[in-house]
Amino acid sequence: MKAYELALDHIEEGILSGRYEVGSILPPERELATQLGIGRSSVREAIRALESQGVLDSAVGAGPASGTRVTSDQSRALTRLLKLHVSLGKYPVDDVVEARVSLERGSAALASTHATADALARLAEVVGAMEAAESIAEFSPLDTGFHVLIAEVSENTLISDLTRAVREALLQPIARASARMADWPAFRDGLNEQHRRIFAAIQAGHPDAAADLMEHHIRHAYSILPMNGAMP
Amino acid sequence: MKAYELALDHIEEGILSGRYEVGSILPPERELATQLGIGRSSVREAIRALESQGVLDSAVGAGPASGTRVTSDQSRALTRLLKLHVSLGKYPVDDVVEARVSLERGSAALASTHATADALARLAEVVGAMEAAESIAEFSPLDTGFHVLIAEVSENTLISDLTRAVREALLQPIARASARMADWPAFRDGLNEQHRRIFAAIQAGHPDAAADLMEHHIRHAYSILPMNGAMP
DNA sequence: GACCGCCATTGGTCTGACCATACGTCAGTA
DNA sequence: TACTGACGTATGGTCAGACCAATGGCGGTC
């Protein structure tokens, strides 16, 4: 077995078994190395691997605030991971569409039952901003923001993370496809109309209607966008 | 900026921009280090981070089969990531339930329209094996296998990867919760009945029915399983 | 008692060395 | 000619040691 895998397994086992929890501090790298009978560089490689998964976080210095500690910052890690794999073109467009339908039906329905006044206000703001957007460069991030915001409003961290990851991974591809369209303004107007309806359903607290409108919205968009085959 | 982040950004940028695709070979570590003006150990830490995300894969030796190459092994990386964060209690039970409902409604519906005779045979086999399972240790992996198999049958790689990752991350927690139950055999019999109905709907090609049955199945299971609050 | 500076601790980084593995080459042989 | 085997080389895997940078605690000074 490779040395860094030894360290990886050791730390992972500590987490899975509950010995380490969020906030726990790992032994210093040098100490962990001698404990496991491996070199410090191997320990560091294991720590890096877990750090990139949002499980560890390192801080230099002395005292209680320093050292490598266990965290649980999955959102960024998950987004990065999905973004990379989507960008590698592993997923055909149709697959991504279906995944978005599944996930965003869920977040739209949950948002309908969870939305607070404040959340609705923020959603309304984005919807309004999209109406006013004249260019693709202006519209695309707002559109992404709309979907991500709904996921966040749903107050479900896992669905929210997954939705955001998939949607953000598509920001560039969608923007590029939009630029290839003959009549983008008309397309945008259609989307905005759908956004208004989705918002209305969420505001009215109709989960089933919101889910159906969201599904229709996503399928409609991809039926028109020229995504040419694979994803990126 | 930290040196290893420089390497990380460099490689990531190469992937996101499309310069690297699946199968591409990175420059040797020593060369990449001098290119970026950093030490080899820093390059290695970046490679490890991406390796743990299923984006890179290293092989020793000489010739065309050696070196570090770009891959896209998302499923395993995603499973590990979720498993760790679930174990750290980041995700409340309800969130995971809702996520599973969203994803598996999708995979069940897709499976109903995509299932081949061969796939149906494999599903039937698992359903049968679960009927015969007497112990939790025997049943739990089969149950996971059933859900994963449906995701695979759906022929949607993204939903399949996500479903598998979430479900496998829950294998241990569910098995442990099952062990705490007073009357597990009765619980198992109930699940098996639902499994049969889901299978029948998929076999008959009824996507809506399959989705509804799957949602009911998942909600029912978690309403009975004693998961005690947080996930692990 | 408050302030300031030294010092120990810890992660961050580099260098250089050596090992293990796998392929390519080339001489030797059948 | 065609096979076979030994050797060299490129590559990742690993380690030891050194030094840097940041941080906080400790102790001395005013």
Image (tube, coloured by chain):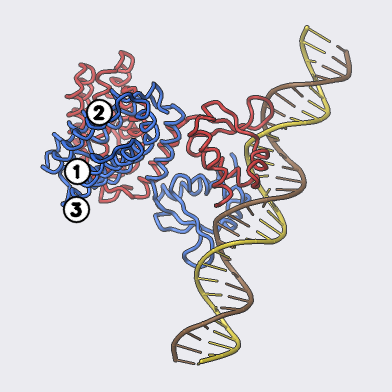
Chain colours: A red, B blue, C yellow, D brown
- Residue C26, located in which quarter of the rendered image? bottom right
Q: Considering only vertical position in the picture, is A192 above or below A5?
A: above
- Residue B149, located in which quarter of the rendered image? top left
Q: Is residue A82 left or right of residue B50?
A: left
* Residue at the extreme front: B134
Query: Label 2 is found on which chain of the structure?
Result: B
Q: Amino acid at mark 3?
A: Asp
Residue A210's x, y, as percent?
A: 20, 25
Residue C7's x, y, as percent?
A: 81, 30
Residue plotted at (17% across, 40% down): B199
Residue plotted at (33% across, 50% down): A90
Q: Amino acid at mark 1?
A: Ala
Badges 2 and 3: C-beta atoms under 8 Å apart? no
Mark 2 element type: helix
Q: Which residue is mark 2?
A: B186
Measured in 3D between alpha carbons, the distance from the residue under mark 2 to the one under mark 1, in whole angstroms, is: 28 Å
Query: Label 3 is found on which chain of the structure?
Result: B
Say whether disc 2 or disc 1 marks the residue closer to the N-terminus: 1
Q: Is residue B205 visible?
A: yes
Say whether disc 2 or disc 3 marks the residue closer to the N-terminus: 3
Q: Which residue is mark 3?
A: B118
Which mark, residue B111?
1
Q: Amino acid at mark 2?
A: Ala
Dot 2 surroundings within 10 Å: few (below 14), some, or many (20 or more)? few
